[in-house]
Amino acid sequence: MLLQTNNITKVFGGHKALDNVNVTFEAGTVHSLLGENGAGKSTLIKILTGVYQQTSGQIIWEGKEVNIERPKAAQDLGINVIHQDRQLVPYFTGLENLFLNKTYPKKVLGGIHWKRMREQANALKDKWKIDIPVDKPVYDMTPTERTMLEILRAMSQESKVLVLDEPTASLTDKESVLLFSLIDHLKKEGVAIIYISHRLEEVIQISDYVTVLTGGKVTASLTKDEITREKIIYHMTDGQQMNASKKEKADLADQQVLLTVSNLATKDDKVKDVSFNVHAGEIVGMYGLAGAGRTESMEAIFGLREKSNGEVVYKEKSYNKVSPKQMIKEGMILIPENRHDEGLIMPNTISHNMTLPILNEVSSGGVLTRKKESEKVQGEMKRFKVKAVSANQTVAELSGGNQQKVVFGKALLTNPDLYICDEPTQAVDIMTRNDIHSFLQEQASNGKGIIFVSSDIQEILEVSDRIIVFSEGKTVADLKNKDIDNHTILDICYQHQKGEN
């Protein structure tokens, strides 16, 4: 036994975020923590890493009780976290990031000994079998390289416990395979991996143990032989039935065409030739491999990326140069992939975030009317079941799933006719994912158009009426979602990626 919690309880203002949690983490194993957003996973990790202190209970480290009063104390023990949001300095090189908060080796006559730093970095890379270009600036690294760099930095501190929080959220399937290979090597070296992910397939693939948290309590502890998708979902949802699924629809070809995109290209050449349309009442899935140009196309349509060619016709009106403000006014809204940087102002309250696009509706004479604001916000919080102390709580304090619900509440307040949803269920729990699917299906049934971008091919198949396939900045297929499967779609992606068509 390396690390153990003994009846850990954490109370925030009368609310029990954790309730007598008992978990054991063993050296050389992968132990996954699962649960809905707000189930207590993040709170438990923050206690183990010294960000929070438990209200009661004990932390046992190598058989002895310890007090982890600050993050430095956790690092000194050998507990490190790779956060979902990368903790790197973008304009520093990998080498400089690797030595952050450390004493740089110095030359005899002064100055940084860069050669020795590289030697130390190369020794670490060899030991942990992590091959990354340390002289490259972080902003120029791939998501995989950034993840590997953070792991290398953690292992340079002689980690015994490594917490990986949604490590594959921004990785392709191929990149995830590289990460899993590294995890296997870390296991063989005796490192305990605490793995947090909402992707059940990978949890089942790599986990030795799974602990499920529900409402701050441990509701299941599963060993490798007991880990199945059905058991995990049952315990995570407390046995509740999830009824969001794709429903058969009548042919929508005769419905109003809300959006037509023809031969779209962007000045940065990320989008080369994109064409598709969206009917009222239709959910159109957008799928492609990494770098296919899906997000960039959505940004160009919404006015966030400058186009060089093509036509965007929205509600029978052609747009040449557009801005997000203009498109919101016309009834189009974008749910961005990166909710932290692009969808929310993290230090602001739920109320301020939700009403940001409609300030004119909740103001009078240029002064915010609290009553109007409260009525709007409370309605959306109730609709999306946002778990929060109040509308005045900052969104930074919410779980990832509840943050995404705030993004959707904010979007709905603009009363859009077309939703562009870019990875709307990324890093949210199963129930929130189900709620988002149900909401979008409801909006489609009310005549709204939905663009649904996702890297999860199974999710695309579950929710879409039609599927547009992207490859290398181009649309290469427009498929009706009937009698097709993931193999068909992937085959199209790879064929065009290789230039076979």
Image: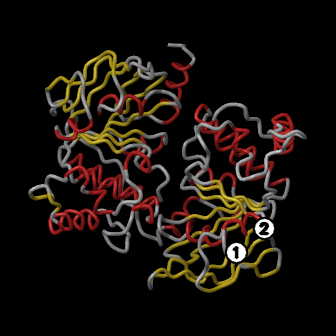
Residue type marked 2: Leu
Across and down, in percent, residue 494 comes to 55, 24
Judged from the image, the secondary structure of the residue bearing numbered disc 2 is helix
Asked if residue 96 lies left or right of residue 197, the reply is: right
Mark 2 lies on residue: 77
Classify 447 as above or below 293. Answer: below
Residue occupying the far left of the picture: 365
The answer for how far apart the CA atoms under marks 1 and 2 are is 9 Å
Q: Answer with mark 1 or mark 2, whichever residue precedes in sequence.
A: 1
Query: What's the amino acid at mark 1?
Result: Ile
Using the image as rendered, state which of residue 255 and residue 60 is in the foreground: 60
CB atoms of marks 1 and 2 within 8 Å: yes
Say which residue label 1 marks: 68
Q: Residue furthest right?
A: 108
Q: Position of residue 236 (x, y in %)?
A: 51, 67
- Whether 6 is drawn above or below 459: the answer is below
Circle 2 packing at 10 Å, graded few (<14), some (14-19), many (20+), is some
Identified at 48% across, 65% down, the residue is 36
Q: Residue at x 20, y 49 (%)?
A: 414
**217 versus 372 height, above or below:** below
Q: Nearer the viewer, residue 125 or 26?
A: 125
Q: Position of residue 443 (x, y in %)?
A: 23, 49
Q: Quadrant of residue 76?
A: bottom right
- Left or right of residue 384: residue 175: right
SS of the residue under disc 1: loop
Q: Nearer the viewer, residue 18 or 140?
A: 140
Out of 472 and 100, give the one closest to the viewer: 100
